Amino acid sequence: MIPILRTVAEMRALARVWRKAGQTVGVVPTMGALHDGHLSLARRARRECDRVVTTIFVNPKQFNNPEDLKKYPRTEAADAALLATVPVDAIFAPGPEEVYPEGFITTVSMAGVAQPLEGHMRPGHFDGVATVVTKLFGMTLADRGYFGQKDWQQLQVVLRLVRDLNMAVEVVGCETIRETDGLAMSSRNVRLTPEGRTKAPVLYAAISAAAKDIRAGQSDRMAIREAAETMRAAGFERVEYIELRDAETLMPSDDPARPRRMLAAAWLDGVRLIDNIPV
Ligand code: PAF
């Protein structure tokens, strides 16, 4: 059985023992409802670190919609069973009162890369992410933190955070894990209806086609418009954004000499899906 730690004191005590023995600590921060994408992060941490901790904490500070927070799936027993297959050394699953005790007043606030796209659509989201990631790294004494490229902007935010605050943590960005039909794995996918699930892969197909057309010389704007039309025709209720951005700063970019990324967010079946690919 993998130990499930609930308090910062327990987590710290265990991490201190590991550190004292000269062992490296790899941390995979999650909000639970684990799938193969999370497990691939844990497996990579397992390969690269002496000790691996998966954190499970549904962070209220990164939800700007209280309904979304309420509906977020909580499946701790199933998550623990999946993590036993890796296996990880510990699960750190504190409650909200442990992470944000009475009197908590500190927020890590980020500008720049945290502002456009997800930052614009979900005000306060990345301040919530930056705050909790800072705390989780501190609580677990992380040497390395593992994050999926599926949340590309989040990955850039965390890279910037660690650099700006001189944290002694190496951030490792890992490939998006996809279903066989291309849909990026996400804890939100289970909320799609069976019919919605058949349409959802169109998001990845549409942005992949747009990226290919842009590489072949089509104008960015035309390729993006076609991708949005394809998604609407497939039944997506709303395309929030499809944008071609500088891969690191997330600012608009028409400079093909710099790495660029196409990022998209769209609603299907009342579920918000995001994805991204290199261009
Ligand atoms: O990607 C997530 O699941 C969350 O944003 C994270 C990094 C665990 C912070 O709560």
Image (cartoon, rainbow, N blue to C red):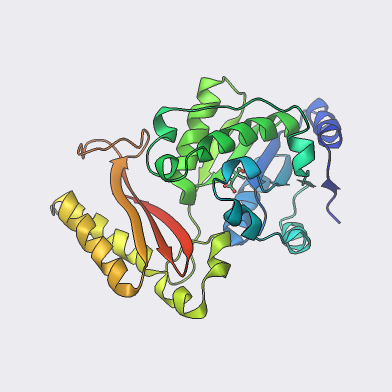
Task: Name which residue lies at 48% across and 48% down.
Answer: 151
- Work out whether residue 221 or residue 18 is closer to the camera in this orientation and state it: 221
Question: Quadrant location of ligand 1?
Answer: top right
Task: Name which residue lies at 61% across and 29% down.
Answer: 169
- Work out whether residue 253 or residue 16 is closer to the camera in this orientation and state it: 253
Give the image quarter of residue 273: bottom left
Q: Position of residue 132 (x, y in %)?
A: 64, 36
Task: Name which residue lies at 82% across and 26% down.
Answer: 20
Q: Quadrant of the N terminus?
A: bottom right
Q: Position of residue 270 (x, y in %)?
A: 47, 66
Q: Say above or below: 112 vs 277.
A: above
- Work out whether residue 13 or residue 77 is closer to the camera in this orientation and state it: 77
Q: Position of residue 274 (x, y in %)?
A: 43, 55
Give the image quarter of residue 13: top right
Q: Say above or below: 85 vs 221.
A: below
Task: Name which residue lies at 67% across and 40% down.
Answer: 27
Give the image quarter of residue 259: top left
Q: Say above or below: 54 vs 19.
A: below
Decide if residue 19 is on the left or right side of residue 259: right
- Work out whether residue 278 or residue 123 is closer to the camera in this orientation and state it: 123
Q: Say above or below: 231 vs 171.
A: below
Q: Position of residue 210 (x, y in %)?
A: 24, 58
Decide if residue 8 is on the left or right side of residue 238: right
